[in-house]
C-alpha cells in the first residue's frame, strides 16, 4: 500500500526509516518531511494542519494509510476529518480522534480523566480569569515548589515551576489575566509538586486492545546536569534501567489498563499511540501528562528496538486486531543524542551546512531540523539531528553515539555530553 507520514522531525524520519523496511509499503510519502525523509521517501510540501491539501495528496497518490506524527493535527481533528469525508473514510489514520486527543489538548481534561478513572496523579485544581483569587488561595495551601500548567497546547512551554509563592502568584496572573500563552492559558491547572525521577511509557492501542512498547527516558533541559531552559528533548535512552518488572507491573495495572478501559468507558475513539509521562515517587508511578503521539527524541530509541513490521502493526491497529500481534523487542539498549543549533532553545541561526554524515559508522543518523538546499544538507531548525546507537548496555550505546558525533560538524553545533548521567 501507499503510506503518508505527517511531520518533519526526527520522530517522523524514524517512523519513515522503520516503514521503509516493510514489504507492505509500496510508495512512502512524508509531508512536509526533511532531508532525512527525502532519502527514503517522497517529501510533499504540505503543512500538517492543511487538511484540504492533505486530502489532495492522499487522493492523488492512492494513499491508504496516514500516520500522524505531531499533536496539532490530532487536536484539530484530522482523524474525524477523514471519517467525515466520503472519499477518505476508508483511509486508515494512525492517531486518535479529536475527542480523545483532548488528553493532550487540555491539561484540565486529562486531569479530570485521571481522577475519574482512579489513576495515580498529582492533586490539582484548575482556575480561570474569574477565579484568580481562588488560585492564590489554593497556592497558599501548597508547599513549594509550585507547578502551574497552561491548559492548552503551548509548544511545550506551558509548564512553569516556581519556588517562590510571590512569583507563583505573579505567574498565575500573567497566564490567566495577561494571556501569557494566549488562549492556551485561559485556564490554568495548579498541581502538587511530585519529587522523583521521570520516564515515559509508550502504549499502542486500537481502542480495544493495547500493547506496551519499550520505555524511554528523555533529557529535556538544554544544559548538562539537567540545568537551564527546557527544550523539546536533547537525548533519550531505552529501556529505562530503573523500570524493572515489578515497577512495569505497577505501571500496567495502575495506569495502562485503567487508561485503556477509561477511553472505552468515556467513548473516546483511539487508534494510535498513548505517550504516558510518568514520575517515579518512592517505588510508585504517577502520571504527569498524556501525549497522544510518540515523543521526540524518544521515538529515535523506541522504534529502533521494535522488531515487528510496523505496517503490519498499524494495519492491526486500524482493523482493531492488535490482540493478534506479538510485539517483539530487541534486547539491546538504544540511545540517542540530539545535535542542536547554538542558541537553541532561544534564538539561533539556520542554513548551516552539515558535514560528516557519510563518515558515521554503526550509528543511525535521524534528521530533524535539516533540509536539502542546493544539493547540500543544511540546518533548518533548533534540533538538527539525532544520533542513535545500539549497545549491550546503554553505556556502550551512548559511547558509540558520542564517537560518531566527533565526525559530525556544523557551525555552532551544540549537544549534551552527559546523556544517561543520572542513571
Ligand atoms: P509537561 O509539559 O506536563 O510534561 O511538564 C513539563 C515538565 O514539568 C515535566 O517533564 C516535569 O519535569 C515537570 N512537571 C510537570 N508536572 C509536575 C509535577 N506535578 N511535579 C513535578 N514536576 C512536574
Ligand atoms: N520529548 C518530549 C515530547 O516529545 O513531548
Image (cartoon, grey):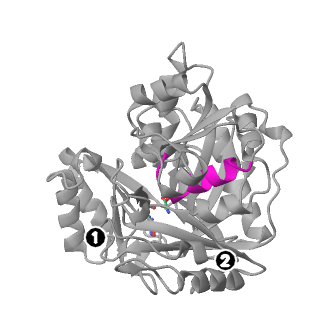
Please tell me whether residue 112 belongs to the stretch shown in magenta: no
Q: Is residue 341 left or right of residue 9?
A: left
Q: Earlier in the sequence, mark 2 or mark 1?
A: 1
Label 2 secondary element? loop
Tag shown at residue 348 = 1
Residue 32's quadrant in the figure?
top left
Q: Residue at x 39, y 70 (%)?
A: 353
Residue 378 percent location from the top left of the image: 39, 65
Separation of residues labelled 2 and 1 (CA atoms):
29 Å
* Mark 1 sits near ligand 2, with its Cβ under 8 Å away: no
Circle on res. 361: 2
Up-down relation of residue 196 to residue 324 (above or below): below
Q: Position of residue 266 (x, y in %)?
A: 57, 32
**Which residue corresponds to the image point at 25% horizontal and 61% vertical from the top-left?**
137
Mark 2 vs mark 1: give the one in front. 2
Give left or right: position of 136 versus 229: left
Residues drawn in magenta: 7-21
Amino acid at each position: 500500500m501507499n503510506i503518508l507520514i505527517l511531520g518533519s522531525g526526527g520522530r517522523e524520519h524514524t517512523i519513515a526509516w522503520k516503514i521503509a523496511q516493510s514489504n507492505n509499503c509500496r510508495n512512502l510519502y512524508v509531508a512536509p518531511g526533511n532531508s532525512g525523509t527525502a532519502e527514503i521517501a517522497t517529501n510533499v510540501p504540505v503543512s500538517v494542519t492543511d487538511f484540504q491539501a492533505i486530502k489532495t495528496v492522499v487522493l492523488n497518490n492512492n494513499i491508504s494509510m496516514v500516520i500522524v506524527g505531531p499533536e496539532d493535527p490530532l487536536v484539530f481533528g484530522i482523524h474525524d476529518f477523514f471519517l467525515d469525508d466520503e472519499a477518505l473514510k476508508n483511509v486508515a489514520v494512525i492517531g486518535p480522534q479529536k475527542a480523545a486527543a483532548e488528553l493532550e489538548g487540555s491539561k484540565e481534561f486529562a486531569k479530570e480523566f485521571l481522577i475519574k478513572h482512579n489513576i495515580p496523579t498529582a492533586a490539582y485544581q484548575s482556575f480561570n480569569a474569574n477565579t484568580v483569587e481562588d488560585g492564590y488561595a489554593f497556592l497558599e495551601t501548597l508547599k513549594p515548589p509550585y507547578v502551574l500548567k497552561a491548559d492548552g497546547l503551548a509548544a511545550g512551554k506551558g509548564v512553569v515551576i516556581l519556588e517562590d509563592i510571590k512569583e507563583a502568584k505573579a505567574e498565575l496572573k500573567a497566564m490567566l489575566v495577561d494571556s501569557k500563552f494566549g488562549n492556551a492559558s485561559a485556564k490554568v491547572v495548579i498541581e502538587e509538586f511530585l519529587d522523583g525521577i521521570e520516564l515515559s511509557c509508550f502504549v499502542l492501542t486500537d481502542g480495544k486492545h493495547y500493547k506496551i512498547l519499550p520505555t524511554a527516558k528523555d533529557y529535556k533541559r538544554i544544559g548538562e546536569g539537567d540545568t537551564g531552559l527546557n527544550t523539546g528533548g536533547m537525548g533519550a535512552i531505552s529501556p529505562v534501567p530503573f523500570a524493572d518488572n515489578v515497577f512495569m507491573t505497577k505501571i500496567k495495572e495502575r495506569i495502562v489498563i485503567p487508561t485503556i478501559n477509561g477511553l472505552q468507558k468515556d467513548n473516546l475513539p483511539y487508534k494510535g499511540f498513548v505517550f504516558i509521562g510518568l514520575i517515579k515517587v518512592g517505588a510508585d508511578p504517577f502520571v504527569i501528562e498524556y501525549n497522544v503521539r510518540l515523543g521526540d527524541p524518544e521515538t529515535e530509541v523506541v522504534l529502533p528496538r521494535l522488531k515487528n513490521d510496523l505496517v503490519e502493526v498499524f494495519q492491526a491497529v486500524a482493523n482493531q486486531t492488535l490482540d493478534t500481534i506479538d510485539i517483539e523487542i530487541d534486547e539491546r539498549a538504544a540511545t540517542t543524542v540530539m545535535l542542536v543549533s547554538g542558541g537553541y532553545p532561544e534564538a539561533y541561526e539556520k542554513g548551516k551546512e552539515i558535514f560528516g554524515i557519510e563518515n558515521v559508522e554503526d550509528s543511525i543518523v535521524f534528521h530533524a531540523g535539516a533540509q536539502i538546499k542546493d544539493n547540500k544538507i543544511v540546518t533548518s531548525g533548533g534540533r538538527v539531528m539525532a544520533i542513535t546507537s545500539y549497545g549491550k548496555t546503554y553505556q556502550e550505546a551512548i559511547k558509540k553515539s558520542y564517537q560518531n558525533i566527533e565526525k559530525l560538524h556544523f557551525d555552532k553545533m551544540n549537544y549534551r555530553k552527559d546523556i544517561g548521567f543520572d542513571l
